[in-house]
Image: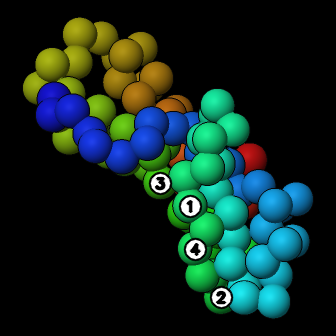
Amino acid sequence: MNETKFTPGPWRWNKDKSVLFSRLNAAVVDSKEDEHVGAVVVVNNANANLIAAAPELYNALELLVNGFYEVDSLEQWEMWIDQARAALAKARGEA
């Protein structure tokens, strides 16, 4: 698999920092090391959730696409599907 150039996940929508930019409708997104990933203009909370879930969505899709022919067991496939479901739940703001 190709090495990515973006800040590795997980990312999170930092609601405390985002309050500072609320007049601009901006969401602050941080990495797991609390390193600032970016402040992005969003229309609503759903967009902030989707942006914060981007690394997990990318990783889940990469596993499913690139690993499709390399699956050793049903358990491995189910684990990948579970990762994809968790990423989707985060993107919807459910996690």
Assign a secondary structure to mark 1.
strand
- Across and down, in percent, residue 91 comes to 60, 59
Give the residue number, with chain letter if any, for mark 1: 38
- Return the residue at label 2: 43
How many other residues sit within 10 Å of disc 3, few (<14), some (14-19) or many (≥20)?
many
Q: Residue 16 falls in which quadrant of the image?
A: bottom right
Q: Amino acid at mark 4?
A: Val
Identify the element where label 3 is drawn: helix
For the point 35% across and 24% down, the residue is 77
On the rendered structure, is 90 left or right of 56?
right
Give the labeled residue for mark 4. 40
Callouts 4 and 2 close, C-beta under 8 Å: no
Q: State how far apart marks 4 and 1 are (Cα).
A: 6 Å
Q: Residue 81 occupies which quadrant of the picture?
A: top left
- Name above or below for residue 24 compared with residue 84: below
Disc number lying in front (4 or 3):
4
Q: Which mark is residue 54?
A: 3
Camera-side mark, 4 or 2:
4
